[in-house]
Amino acid sequence: MARHSKQNIRQHSEHSTNAGTNGAQQRNQPDHVVAEAIDLTKVYGDADNQVVALNHVNVEFERGQMTAIMGPSGSGKSTLMHCMAGLDQPTSGQVIVEGLEVSAMNQRQLTKLRREQIGFIFQSFNLVPTLSAEENILLPLQIAKKPIDRDWFRQIVKVVGLEQRLTHRPSQLSGGQQQRVACARAMMARPSVIFADEPTGNLDSHSSREVLGFLKQSVHEYGQSIVMVTHDPRAASYADRVLVLADGNITQDLVHPTYDQILEVFADEGEEPSA
Amino acid sequence: MIRIGLRDARAHFGRFVMSIIAIALGVSFVVGSFCFREMMNNQVDQMMASNSDADVYVRGNKEQKDSSSSFSSSSSSDSTSAESKSYNRIDISLVDTINGVKGVDTAEAVYEVNGLVLVGKDDNAVSTTGGMTVGMGLTKGTWRSATLTQGRWAKAKDEITLHTFAAQSAGLKVGDTTKIVYPDGPADVRVVGIFSTASSQAGAIIIGLNPQTAKEYFQQQSGQVGTARYLTVYGSAADGQPLTVAQQQTLADSINAALPSDAHAVAVTGQSVRDDNAASTKKALGFIQPLILIFAVIALFVGSFIITNTFSMIVRESMRGYALLRSIGASPVQVFVTVAVQAILLGLVGSGIGIGLGWIMVRGIVMLMDRLGTPMTGAVDPSVSDMLVGLIVGVLVTFIGAALPARRAATAPPIQAMNETVNPEKPVWPRGVIGTVMLILGALAWLLCWRIALADDTGVAVSPWNGFNDWLKSLGTGWPLGIGAGLVVIGVIVLAPALVTPTSAVLGWIPAHVFTVTGRLATRNLSRSKRRTANTAAALFVGVAIVSCLGVVAASAKASVAGIVDSGLKSDFSAMSVSNGQIPDEAINAIRKTNGVDTVSQSRMLMGVTYGSGDDAAAAMTFAEQPSLFTKVFAPVTNSGDANAALRNGELVVGLQVAKDNGWKVGDTVKVNGRQVVVDEEATAKAQTDYQAQVKAKIDGLTAEAQQLLASGDVSGAQSKSAEAQQAAEDAKNVDPTTLVKTKTETTHVTMKVGAIIENSIYRSMVLMNDDAANKIANQYTMFTIMLFINAKHGTDIDALKTRLIKAVKSYYVVNVQDRDEFKSTMSSMVDQILLVLYALLALSIVIAIFGIVNTLALSVSERTKEIGLLRAIGTSRAQVRGMLGIEAAIIAVFGTMMGMVVGVAAGVVIRVVYQANGLSVLSIPWNQLGVFLALAILIGLVASVSPASRALKQPVLDAVAAE
């Protein structure tokens, strides 16, 4: 049932490289890796007043997994995700998504990348207020002028449970519903990887569980790759893998940790786990 | 708190640039319009002071309906030109009586001759856009403000003295010979002197003539002999200086005491005459200021609106700061003050720049007029009160604009301010209802206006209530038209927000289908803030409405004139005098003799013809025509009767307007009173006797003196005296007997029948009769050829004939021969010139509107930072974001333009219908022009979106998304 066969993606990216439409460098990347950071460094501020957000970070994100990035405020977790998603330019090092070097892309290539490889889920839902739920979900495809797969749409809508709400405007939806629309939107274009920035940050625990459940389902049933930044150990416990950042370095790399394991890590760090 | 406001202002200065420009433009229009009016008033006052500088005027004491008929028919303008009061004419012999009054220095009748043409150094007629060419009988003492700077005053018919401006324009010096075209043809003259006046004459060419020559032509032109409109009197009380008002009054009183009671004359102070004249002139020029003020209002409206937007942006962005201030204990008033301080500062800066701009603007206009040949010496610098008005308006508008956002900043609860939630807009349906009601009322006013016009034209009652009808009739069409227009315009502005959603759905249909996503997003964005969208569009709306209304009127005027020519005019050429005067008989003969001319029809205007008897006598422009007029020149549009037969049978052919005014019907008989100038045998005989007696007395005196000297032994003295006596006798023989001929005006009364009533628009306000009938009531002194219509012989090459005709009349300078197309385009080019001015104003309102759109989009972009970031994050390209904003802007612009066009065209149609009787017989809507406006609107929108879109794209996607 995995709609994202690896082969498809490979073919797709090779095709685009060969056609020369996406001038980014093609990198050899193992098939199981959907995105990777190589010696990634991000420094804010000027020479006198430097803040190192990412300090020579090397990390690979596995295809078909949900990876959570955790860490205290200022640990660089958001910076890592922004760099990975091409939202921010690293100071040095490389970001590779699906074999394409994101860190060397210009605006046009970035736009193409966002249309084809990347999906976003934000903390504050970020729906277009003038569009209905359905229009919001279909927006990325329409922007990219890609054909709409109605079956896929119905399937996603059913999974996120928004069948009755499709004609509603965002202002007529609850926070949880809005975030589920945002998830459906990210899923709709079947991107290589979805970056989720604190997707449950503005939700109550019930809605959080719904959204996280849906994300997990999409990983397991459809082979979606998801990278999620979160403060919340409960949210992180849904992930297949948890990376812990502190002061710009990856300090822990836990595979299938339990909630307690995660709490423990933070206890070690001497930090309050929740935001 | 004020300090915080000032610091904020400094930080936001970049934001304020657009607001400052808008305020400055608005204020500059306000100041400029006041300044311009003052300059004109000042100019008029100066000209009055130097041109009507007599201490006392003696004029008739009975007010008259002005029967002076200026030849300005067929123009479509309504007849609201300033009418100065007119009095009965007085006998010039009163001069002698007045000269005998103590305190009178000189008393004189100054004659003016209009319609002269001065031929310049380059052998072309001197003409300026500023004004006409006037000849005045001038000699020492007749015009105190005129100072002879070179040479002497003209003493004979072949001598002239020129005003400095005239000399300069013509390139003539003292001693040069040139030609002057008098009403009866050109004459060689020598420039013998140059004089200057205290104020500039606004482009008028003034020629000083020998007083006797001026008198002759004046009498010829006016058909009045021995009378004058007024006599000018200079007093001696101030030793050649102008008298004070009190002195003028004293002098006037003593003159009044001396005037015989049957002279129907009264002396009034110079000041009162100047005031009256100035007032009527100023009234005539008064329309210019409101026109400029309309654009000032647009600019200020947009300005205040831009300020609201700008401050909304600033307040929105600083909301956290305000919330912080509030949470640490600042009162709402204090927060309000921090915003208000910025607004006031901005208003001050904008107004200051605006005052400077307004001043430059008026300077520019004056310079332009100078270059076009209308020098102005009126003061152009704004007075303190002008500046104060500008400053107050500017600051007030800014403050009003900023008040709402400032209030929002002050009253928002701290928590809400920190969270920044967007409150939904208030519903717009109440505005829809109010706007619709106003629109309906406006339309009703227009309907009423049309009914009144119809009632005037055809006598159809406006309503079943008589009293109401009378009241409406007295109201006229102007008020309902104006009120209707005002209601419609304001109604549309009020209604506009309610129209935004449907309109953007309709206008957005094409973009939404061509650019699926961006088009749809753009369309929906417009409905988010309906008031803002509507206000932005309103700026364009008003400007476009004015221009398209006038465009319709102008196009209709053109089409109407063209229609007259196409449907009615049968002759091949027309000829007119460019000086608006008569065509010299020699010129007419020259045209007749030109090879290829078949017939020449003469239109001769009869001076001073009245109809009816006694006090009810009504004046009407009366023309003598050949019987063949209706078959060879103009096809008649007959209302009743047979125009052609009537003219041939010596009956009156009456224009519809005249017939209606006087209540004439075909078959009525009318008493026609004409004027003839004839030799007054008795007076001439008396004058000759008097002159002979005078000469005899002089000779007798000299002879007696000679004898006396001879008796005392002074032989040489006696000889010289007797030589003088002989000389005097000789002079008397040589004197031109015509100068001793006294003429008088005789009124002839003839009863004529109204044979037909016609409604050709050029004949609407005229009475026509054939030459035979005209000769019974007028003679050559009271009848002038105004226009010729020339038919070519069958088979003649029209172009070649035209060249020959032009050559034939070349030596008369004033005669302008036009073929049919040129005759048509005379009117068109005039209309086009007016349109040119309008387009300049439109361009300005477009600039202002662009500011409005740019600003609205900038605000909208700032509010949608996150949303645009999101769109970028999910793969919207830069071009798509630009496209979205471009479509938004274009729809706003098209929305405003379409509202403007609909209202403007409607107003134009109403005006056309109302003034149908004044010549706007054909409705023509300039579709091409409107199409261009629409295309221009789209372009404007796209241009306006460039900068806000760049701003939106400059924001990194990350910041946009993370902007919490």
Image (cartoon, coloured by chain):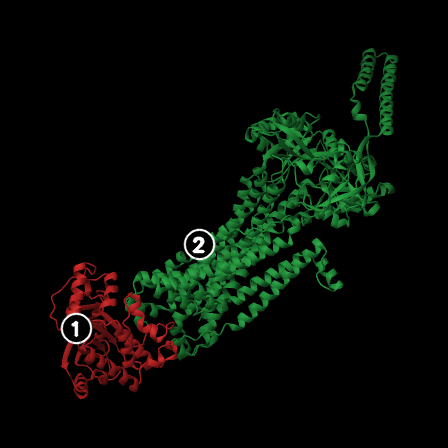
Chain colours: A red, B green
Q: Mark 2 highlights which residue?
A: B935
Please give the name of the residue rendered at 20% of the width and 68% of the height, measured from the top-left corner: A42
Side of B742 where B527 appears, left or right: left
Residue B357 image position (x, y, % from top left): 50, 52
Which residue is denoted by mark 1 in the rendering?
A5
Mark 1–mark 2 distance (CA, rounded to whole Å): 51 Å
In the drawing, does residue B739 fall left or right of residue B409? right
Q: Relative to residue B617, is residue A200 depicted above or below? A: below
Mark 1: amino acid: Ser
Q: Give residue B258's position: percent from left, percent from top.
A: 85, 41
Q: Is residue B662 visible?
A: yes
Chain under label 1?
A
Residue at figure coordinates x 68%, y 58% from the top left: B452
Quarter of the image containing the N terminus of chain A? bottom left
Task: Say if residue B347 shows up in the picture.
Answer: no
The type of residue carrying mark 2 is: Ala
In the displayed structure, does residue A38 sit left or right of residue B165? Answer: left
Residue nearer the viewer, B64 or B916: B916
Q: Secondary structure at mark 1?
A: loop
Instruction: Choose between A257 and B168: the one closer to the eye.
Output: A257
Front of the two marks 1 and 2: 1
Task: Using the rendered image, report if marks 1 and 2 lie on a common chain.
Answer: no
Figure quadrant of the C terminus of chain A: bottom left
